[in-house]
Amino acid sequence: MIPAGFEYHRPGDIASAIGILQEHGDEARVIAGGHSLIPMMKLRMAEMGHLVDLQAIEELKGIDIGTDTVSLGAMVTQHELITHDGLAKAIPLIREAALQIADPQVRYMGTVGGNVANGDPGNDMPGLMQCLNAVFELSGPDGSRSVAARDFYEAAYFTAREDEEILTRIAIPVPGSGVGQAYEKQKRKIGDYATAAAAVMVGNGTASVAMTNLADTPVWSESASSALAEGNVEGSVAAMLGDIDPVADNRGPVEFKKHVAAVMLRRAIDRAQSRAG
Ligand code: FAD
């Protein structure tokens, strides 16, 4: 299908983009790579009079590698996440997860900001960002604020972001050198969203565990993380199975999804542990 008509805006800075969102209220939406929004518009599941394209805003671009923190501009593409050598050294988990998203065509356009702001439980980056304890930086009419990825997701397609706020950057603490990381994703075919995916970090007496597409939000489990930090793998898997809430759909019934979740999590833990130390 063809999307309904809309007016196209291409602001050059964040303040102008926020101004357009304020002016048109519910009628306006930002567009980044367009690889979630345009399909929704074509299906007429999203319809708006004004699209605010973020492509020309330089402040939203770039990957900065600091000693303690990595900063990703919201408009960094999934392709850039894969090809940036400094990022692959600082936080290899991001490259490993980004390679599991869709296919090269989608990854050339799809952005990290769009992937996390979208609020789709099937997107890979939200659970990944919760595992990494990332912080989302938002700018709106009242200024800027930060929201932890672990506090950002409220329900499917509902997040802590206000309508007139733009996600500008993502700050991620660099894991310690002894920390092993792994991302495991089961999908029906290449390019598909996850039936279940697990992001794991473990080492130096700490652990962090998050899963994707097993509830209406990504699931970072405090109890699964604590159990893994104590070396209790099966305790961690059991805790995660208690925290997820999958529903039956064309990816399978609930029992199958729980089974796949446990398999993905064990594999990710195993690989992360083998990379730790
Ligand atoms: P857009 O589509 O432009 O925007 C998505 C939403 O986020 C919109 O509501 C928009 O208003 C909002 N938004 C975007 N940027 C910002 C911002 N900076 N501030 C505030 N709001 C913002 N994703 C996966 O994770 N895993 C997959 O396996 C996967 N498979 C896919 C397969 C196909 C065939 C396709 C078409 C897509 C797939 N995707 C998958 C989704 C893809 O990764 C999208 O690119 C991504 O979800 C959204 O990023 P985008 O830049 O395209 O955002």
Image (cartoon, helix red, strand yellow):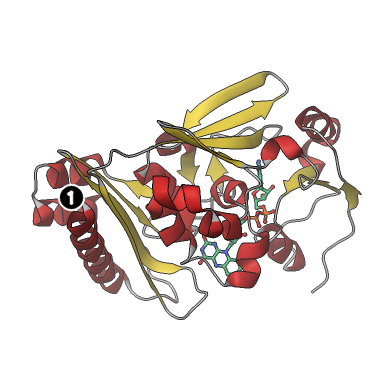
156 left or right, relative to 21? left
- Say which quadrant the N terminus sits in: bottom right
Instruction: Tell me which residue sits at (75%, 39%) in the image.
Output: 58
23 left or right, relative to 55? right
Q: Which image quadrant shows ligand 1?
A: bottom right
The crowding category of the residue bearing disc 1, from other C-alpha atoms within 10 Å (few below 14, some 14 to 19, many at least 20), is some
Task: State the image coordinates of residue 205 (x, y, percent, origin top left).
Answer: 14, 38
Instruction: Tell me which residue sits at (48%, 79%) in the image.
Output: 190
Give the quarter of the image for residue 179. top left
Task: State the image coordinates of residue 243 (x, y, percent, origin top left).
Answer: 26, 49
Task: State the image coordinates of residue 199 (x, y, percent, origin top left).
Answer: 33, 54
From this view, report whether residue 65 is shown above or below residue 270: above
- Tell me the kind of residue under disc 1: Ala
Query: Looking at this view, is 252 or 8 the one in front?
Result: 8
From this view, report whether residue 44 is shown above or below residue 31: below
From this view, report whether residue 94 is shown above or below residue 190: above
Residue assigned mark 1: 239
Dot 1: element? helix
